[in-house]
Image (spheres, rainbow, N blue to C red):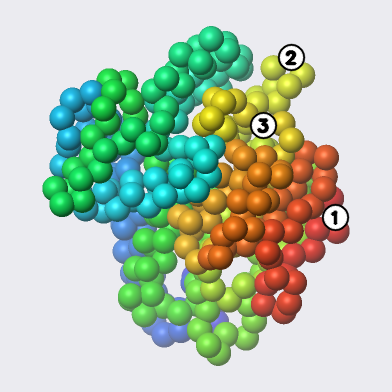
Amino acid sequence: MEPLIIKRTCMGSPFEITAWPGGSRGAAEAAVLTAYAEVARVEDLLTDFRDSPLTALNAAAGGPAVKVPEELFGLVDFALGICRDSGGAFDITYASAGRLWREAFCTGVPPAPERIAEALRLVGHAKIELDRAAGTIRLPEKGMRIGLGSIGKGYGVDRAWRVLRDLGLENFCVNGAGDLRVASSPGAPRPWRIGLKNPFAADGRAAGCLEIRSGAVVTSGDYERFFVHRGKKYHHIIDARTGRTRDDIASVTVLASTAALANAYSISAMALGPEEGAAFLRRRREASGVIITAAGAVINCNLKTGSKETYAADRL
C-alpha cells in the first residue's frame, strides 16, 4: 500500500503529513485534514502577526494582568522553564527586541549596537507575572512582548500528531518545515529514517541519518534564514542575552519526546554556542542531540549510537 502524503502551508511554513492508512484510505485522508485544521487553530492562538490571544496580551503590556486561554497560559509557563534553564539565552520576551532583526532581514543591514542595547531593556523573562489561580499573565513594562515562534511550530506539529493518533492512525510523520514527529506501530517493518542536513553542503546532501520509531527531531541552523553584510553572516537565531547572532555554531539537532521540546532545546543550544550548548543538552534527561560547529566539528550530546537511534556525521 502506498503512503498518503498531503501538503499544506501552515503557520507560514510548508507542512507535510505522510501516513500509512492501515485501513480505509478515505478515513486516513479525513484524519490528516482534521490534523491540519488543528494546526490552523494553534496558529490562531499563537500568531503575533494578526489579532490573537497572544497579540492581545502583548498589547496590554504595561497595564493590568490579562486573562488568557488556559492553553496559552500553559505554553508560556512551559517556555519560561526553558528560559530559566538556558540562563536567558532562550527568552520568549526577546520579541520585544526582535523587530530590529525583522527590519534587518528586510534591509540586509544588522541593527546598530546602540539600538540593540536600548531594545534589550525590555527583554527579561523573569519580569513576566503569572497568576495560576486567576489564569492571568502580566507584562509589567510598556513595549514588552512575548513571542512563541520558538515553540509554536513544534507545538502545532505535536497537536497534529495527537489528532492523528486519536483518530486511529499508527504509522505517520508530521513534518512542519523540518520540525518532525513520528509514530510507528509495534509491527512496523522498519524505523523512520531522517536525513540530517549538512550545513556546509549547498546541494542539500545529508550529513548523517537518524533512525527512530517514535519521538520528535528538530534541527536549528544558520543556513535557512540569513543575510550577509560586509562579509559576515547574520542568521535568525539570536542569543537573547546579547541581542546578537553567533558565528561559532552551524546547526543543532535535537531528539526529544515532543516537537515543542525539541524545537526549544535546539534553539537554546544554538543561542548558547558550542560549549554552553553541549553542556545544556547533556543536562537534559528527556532529550539528546548533536551540534555541528562552524569549524565542522561534531559534538555528540547523549545521542545513542545503537540500532534505534543512529547518527553518522561522515560527510561533512
Q: Amino acid at mark 3?
A: Arg
- Identify the disc placed on residue 315: 1
Instruction: Identify residue for label 3.
Output: 246
- Identify the disc placed on residue 42: none
Question: Alpha carbon of mark 2 to alpha carbon of mark 3: how far?
Answer: 16 Å
Write the residue at 85% across / 55% down. Answer: 315
Of labels 1 and 3, the one closer to you: 3
The mark nearer the N terminus, 1 or 2, is 2
The mark nearer the N terminus, 1 or 3, is 3
Write the residue at 46% across / 45% down. Answer: 84
Q: Amino acid at mark 2?
A: Arg
Question: Alpha carbon of mark 1 to alpha carbon of mark 2: how far?
Answer: 30 Å
Q: Amino acid at mark 1?
A: Arg
**Label 2 SS:** loop
**Label 3 SS:** loop
Of labels 2 and 3, the one closer to you: 3
Write the residue at 33% across / 26% down. Answer: 144
